[in-house]
Image: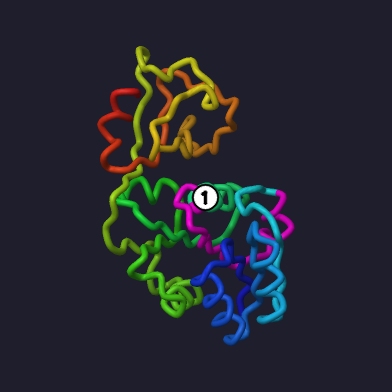
């Protein structure tokens, strides 16, 4: 029996919760929508927490230190990535992340520490349940292709973003700075974090924005 935290209670999250409960696992569901939490708690008789799964306080409340696996299934790639990275930095044993439109780079995803990456074509709840409860089947799943990329870029001295706080940077629509690599460590930056020349930043970007974001960096 496993203790699993599911972040995002949409259609896939609901059915995954149902399957895992039927298999005898303990499940906690986290979602921002209080009505959805109430519905799942009533229908499936499981613990739900209303809150933002990217916040350490909510993850602690959900029992991250005891959990065998965290699954992020919200409708936002950015939210899923940030929640997953936060969980990993807090010591999560196993993190599965659903990405809707991401063109992956194996080395970068491994550097992020994601144990399982699931794309829409493989997002059937039963399949996810199999991968989570039998992690030896696949350490890192790369499935399908998308219209976005994760870029690892080093900030040049003359970069438009060097010397600016993240909150001050006008990031093109369809892009997001999701992490910074400092001295070999992956750090989730606060909005007040100032970008310095030489920093390596990880950016989620739609394919059509890649050239634009590279010019900025």
Query: In percent of the image, x 60 and y 49: which residue is there?
Result: 54
On the rendered structure, is 45 left or right of 187?
right
Look at mark 1 in the image and give the residue it sits on.
79
Quadrant of the frame with the C terminus:
top left
- Secondary structure, mark 1, is helix
At which x and y percent is residue 187? 53, 37
Q: Which residues are magenta?
A: 57-80
Query: In percent of the image, x 49 and y 71: which residue is there?
Result: 12
At which x and y percent is residue 142? 32, 61
Residue 55 lies in the magenta-colored region: no
On the rendered structure, is 196 left or right of 17?
left
Residue 45 sits above or below residue 212 on the image:
below
On the rendered structure, is 166 left or right of 197?
right
> What's the coloring here?
rainbow
Residue 76 lies in the magenta-colored region: yes
Query: In percent of the image, x 44 and y 60: which residue is there?
Result: 98
Quadrant of the frame with the N terminus:
bottom right
At which x and y percent is residue 102? 34, 52
């Amino acid at each position: 029996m496993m203790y699993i935290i599911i972040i995002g209670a949409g259609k896939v999250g609901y059915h995954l919760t149902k399957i895992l409960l039927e298999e005898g696992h303990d499940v906690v569901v986290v979602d921002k929508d209080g009505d959805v939490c109430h519905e799942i708690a009533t229908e499936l008789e499981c613990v739900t927490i209303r809150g933002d799964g990217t916040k350490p306080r909510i993850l602690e409340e959900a029992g991250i230190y005891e959990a065998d696996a965290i699954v992020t299934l919200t409708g936002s790639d950015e939210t899923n990535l940030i929640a997953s990275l936060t969980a990993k930095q807090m010591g999560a044993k196993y993190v599965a992340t659903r990405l809707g439109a991401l063109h992956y780079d194996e080395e970068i995803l491994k550097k992020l520490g994601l144990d399982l990456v699931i794309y829409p074509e493989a997002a059937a709840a039963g399949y996810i349940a199999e991968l989570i409860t039998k992690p030896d089947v696949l350490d890192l799943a790369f499935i399908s292709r998308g219209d976005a990329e994760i870029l690892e870029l080093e900030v040049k001295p003359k970069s438009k973003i060097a010397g600016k706080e993240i909150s001050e940077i006008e990031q093109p629509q369809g892009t997001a700075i999701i992490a910074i690599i400092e001295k070999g460590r992956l750090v989730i930056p606060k909005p007040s974090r100032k970008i310095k020349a030489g920093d390596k930043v990880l950016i989620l970007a739609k394919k059509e924005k890649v050239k634009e974001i590279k010019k900025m960096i």
